[in-house]
């Protein structure tokens, strides 16, 4: 993990674009922020039960009370009372993977949400604080570098010294004969396009085997989601604008998504940015593939003799409620011994790879990944299957000393379909 991000943030030969400070009035911006979040802050049960902090992956490994959903809401009350300002609290909000566990566990969500017509939105609150910080000139050093590099290259600095840019964004597809454009466009996130190229190669070949026609973008940029998660909202919107214009120019109707982080960007961020203009259908590849298996268009036949469990990516399970289809796919693969746990108990499972935590605090991500791998090892498995490329690097690093291999679900399915995937599972 540290190798990943150390590389990603090493000084680069390319010139960094300065992140512009907006001519923003800090007092006004803070006041607007408090106005927006006051109700949510006072609705937080901060003084009592503390359910939510126990499912928080950051709290689990740090026991730091200032890095909890409870504290994140209480700070807004303190800002409302004039006791704290954004400069006092910005750094605390680094310590969140935006997994959404606390939102599910909150009594507002569990018991009272319907009555009060209120739902806890800690992830949005964390994003809002980070955005306020950036807009008022408060930057976290690694996030600033990361976003400057992303802006310069149009893609995240996934591999640092490796060629990350427009010239190489489609290299993962070499030899696969995928056209440019079409009704269905496959969007491949930066980590998969430049690092774990075996994942998009598996996805593309599975879709081709099922007879699903699709193409690639003329000029794909980063989805902008990570920038939005770290508070660089203007940059995120510029990237989103580029991608939307590119899709529209090529007449795309559907965007096929293999990465849960992109899925969040396209189903939650883009509609907020563009409103009715964003009229494309966003399709999760896992759901399409599960349907092809149900209909008999795909039949896994090659036995895979492994003992596995499944890692529910937070952005699929906790945030989008997608947990059945991956299990359907895994149960269709012959030879597998699948030691599953009820998906509900997965609320507190997280790789630590999300929300920019791995960029600013790789040591915390490593602790969270280690805790996740420990839960897998208690099930006596040799393989942890994930459906999120961004989780697979930190989980692989944590799994190595435990002799637990981390495999992407699309790769495993491709193997059972008799496909020779090719590509790379990343530098080891
Ligand atoms: S979203 Fe996840 S990491 Fe962030 S405070 Fe809630 S439980 Fe913790």
Image (spheres, rainbow, N blue to C red):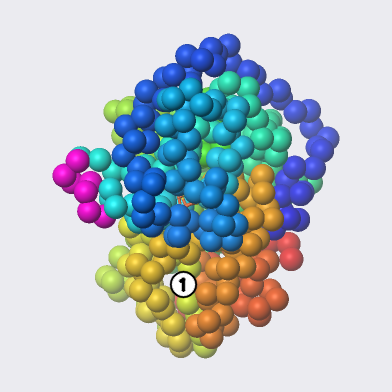
- Residue in front for this viewpoint, 413 or 115: 115
What residue is drawn where x is 50% and y is 83%?
Answer: 379
Residue corresponding to mark 1: 310
Q: Is residue 35 visible?
A: yes
Position of residue 129 in the picture relative to residue 9 (left or right): left
76 or 297, which lies in front? Answer: 76
Image quadrant assignment for residue 291: bottom left
- SS at mark 1 in the image: strand
Q: Residue at x 60, y 48 (%)?
A: 357
Is 55 covered by the magenta stretch? Answer: no
Q: Which residues are magenta?
A: 110-116
What percent of the width, then of the height, locates residue 246?
48, 32
User: What predominant SS class does the magenta segment belong to?
Assistant: helix
Identity of the residue drawn at 63% across and 62% down = 367
| The N terminus, quarter of image | bottom right
Residue 267 image offset from top left, x and y in percent: 37, 42
Q: Is residue 112 magenta?
A: yes
Quadrant (top left, top right, bottom left, bottom right) of the C terminus: bottom right
For image coordinates 58% across by 61% down, the residue present is: 61
């Amino acid at each position: 993990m540290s190798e990943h991000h150390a590389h990603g943030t090493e000084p680069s030969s390319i010139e960094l674009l300065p992140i512009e400070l907006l001519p923003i009035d800090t007092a006004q911006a803070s006041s607007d922020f408090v106005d927006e979040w006051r109700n949510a802050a006072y609705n937080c049960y901060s003084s009592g039960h503390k359910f939510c902090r126990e499912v928080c992956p950051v709290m689990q490994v740090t026991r730091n009370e200032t890095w909890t959903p409870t504290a994140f809401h209480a700070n807004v009350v303190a800002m409302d009372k004039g006791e704290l300002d954004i400069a006092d609290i910005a750094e605390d909000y680094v310590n969140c993977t935006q997994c959404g566990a606390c939102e599910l566990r909150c009594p507002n969500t569990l018991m009272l949400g319907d009555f009060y017509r209120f739902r806890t939105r800690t992830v949005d609150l964390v994003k809002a604080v980070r955005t306020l910080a950036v807009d008022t000139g408060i930057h976290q050093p690694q996030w600033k570098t990361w976003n400057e590099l992303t802006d310069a290259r149009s893609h995240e600095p996934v591999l640092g010294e490796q060629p990350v840019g427009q010239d190489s964004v489609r290299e993962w597809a070499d030899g696969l004969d995928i056209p440019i454009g079409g009704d269905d466009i496959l969007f491949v996130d930066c980590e998969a396009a430049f690092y774990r190229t075996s994942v998009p190669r598996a996805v593309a070949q599975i879709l081709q085997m099922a007879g699903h026609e699709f193409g690639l973008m003329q000029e794909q940029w980063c989805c902008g989601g990570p920038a939005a998660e770290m508070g660089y909202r203007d940059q995120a919107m510029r990237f989103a604008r580029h991608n939307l214009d590119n899709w529209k120019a090529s007449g795309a109707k559907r965007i096929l998504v293999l990465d849960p982080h992109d899925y969040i960007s396209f189903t939650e961020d883009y509609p907020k940015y563009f409103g009715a203009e964003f009229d494309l259908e966003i399709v999760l590849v896992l759901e399409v593939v599960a349907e092809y298996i149900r209909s008999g268009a795909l039949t896994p036949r090659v036995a895979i003799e492994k003992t596995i469990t499944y890692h529910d990516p937070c952005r699929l399970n906790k945030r989008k409620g997608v947990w059945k289809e991956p299990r359907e796919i895994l149960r269709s693969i012959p030879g597998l011994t699948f030691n599953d746990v009820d998906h509900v108990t997965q609320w507190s499972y997280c790789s630590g790879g999300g929300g920019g935590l791995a960029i600013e605090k790789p040591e915390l991500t490593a602790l969270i990944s280690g805790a996740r791998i420990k839960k897998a090892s208690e099930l006596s498995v040799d393989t942890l299957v994930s459906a999120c490329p961004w989780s697979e690097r930190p989980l692989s690093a944590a799994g190595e000393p435990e002799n637990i291999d981390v495999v992407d679900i699309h790769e495993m399915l491709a193997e059972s379909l008799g496909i020779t995937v090719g590509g790379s599972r990343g530098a080891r």
